[in-house]
Amino acid sequence: MKLAPSSLRRSLRAVRDDESTDGGRAQAAGEEAPAVATELAGRRAGPNYVVEAYDLTKIYDNRYIALNALNLRVRKNSVYGLVGPNGAGKSTAFRLMLGLQRPTAGEIRVLGRPMGAESAELRRRIGFLPTAPAFPRHMTPISYLQFVSKIVGLPAERAKIRMTTLLQSVDLTDVASQRIEGFSTGMETRLGIAAALMNDPELLVLDEPTYGLDPPGRRQMIELIRELSGRDRTIIIATHILNDVERVCTDVGVIAQGRLIYDGAMAEMRRLARQNSITVEIEGNVASFERRIPELDEPGSVRWERVGSEVRITFLRANAVTEYLKRLLDLVERSGVELLRLDTGTHEVEEAFLRRLEEDRSRGVLRAPDWAAQEGALEPGAEEADRGGGSRSGAA
Ligand SMILES: Nc1ncnc2c1ncn2[C@@H]1O[C@H](COP(=O)(O)OP(=O)(O)O)[C@@H](O)[C@H]1O
Ligand SMILES: [Mg+2]
């Protein structure tokens, strides 16, 4: 898919019916978003929030707790990343947001109103992309979008114009009259996004929009979302791959076991994550290597964690990393281990919220009881869990 960002932005602008916007979206980067998880229960947030969940709880079959008193709010015109491992409750939260299911307890408000099964009017103001959307195979993008425009009650003339523009926006013009059955996952997802945009929604909800895409497809999808966000519109993206949404989201909420364990501005999370780290994978006497890490720097300047054959060292102060690296490689030499891999500063977002959890734990706040067991469910840490070996950590 090739996207010409400026022309896409123009075409999306043309799609918009209502030009009387209030001066575009509030800029989120760098702005403090309030930490909702801990302080919100019971309070009412007001019109600046497009989605508000208060102690939202969903229990399936009287036994599976999918959402456990979730408190969350999404600021108007933000791009909100709802990030968490598989089974965390993201899709359930979306189904409640759309009024497709009833909460067991708690409250969900969308666009300032309570959302429920009977809220058809409210639902018309939302666009929804389910995970891996399924389409009637015999239809074409044109016939499918016509079908959608009838459902949302768009007049035929207007539907035609919008359809043309949207197909262009998601780069499906060339295949607009081809049967969907030959489409790739990426094409289907883009068609799903076009369908979700037919009613020009104020709120766009995307459930794992990068599902099933290869890395280039993912990047293109994020680029498309970025373009969609340049309007007076709120977007919520659920994903279990942090890297995918890190660059496009203004705000982030981390969900695990049905609870929000972190939320804030993405910029803040990046700031948290800016601390440098080095990961080395070594072979040989890892334990003896680990014992000598404190020799490398002043006490209290690094924290390290060993998972199997991997040691991740995080700098807690403004350490001279290059100097440290030299000493570290020297230690590799001296302790006779073999260096298999050396990495710096990747997976920043994951580290930031894992660190946040660790801080909470050390303060005695236990928001996600079995998080340790869940860590492995998060990419790319998933490999770590499989790799076996002991895990421990220390500070020097
Ligand atoms: N219809 C259902 N019946 C029973 N359990 C369900 C149902 N839907 C989801 N769950 C369970 O609820 C939890 C949250 O699922 P889900 O919302 O799909 O998470 P996510 O989208 O974050 O992967 C999981 O443990 C899942 O197995
Ligand atoms: Mg899901």
Image (cartoon, helix red, strand yellow):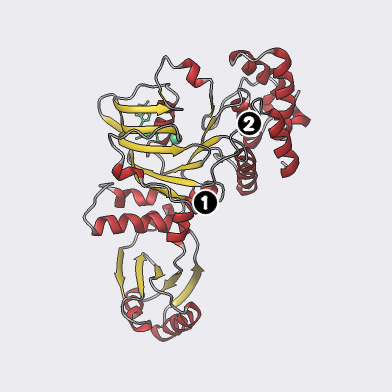
Residue 283: horizontal and vertical position, in percent?
42, 73
Front of the two marks 2 and 1: 1
Helix, strand or loop for disc 1? loop
Q: Quadrant of the N terminus?
A: top right
The C terminus lies in which quarter of the figure?
bottom left
The percent position of residue 276, horizontal first and vertical second, equals 46, 68
Residue 350 position in % (x across, y down): 43, 55
Q: Residue at x 45, y 77 (%)?
A: 338
- Element class at badge 2: helix
Distance between mark 2 and mark 1 Cα atoms: 31 Å
The residue to which callout 1 is attached is 29
Q: Work out whether 152 lies above or below 182.
A: above
One can see residue 362 in this view: yes
Residue plotted at (35% across, 67% down): 306
Residue 270, position as x, y percentages in the image = 47, 57
Q: Nearer the viewer, residue 78 or 246?
A: 78
The one nearer the camera, 129 or 271, is: 271
Residue 188 numbered mark, or none: 2
Q: Quadrant of residue 188?
A: top right
- Name the amino acid, label 1: Ala
- Rendering quadrant holding ligand 1: top left
Of labels 2 and 1, earlier in sequence is 1
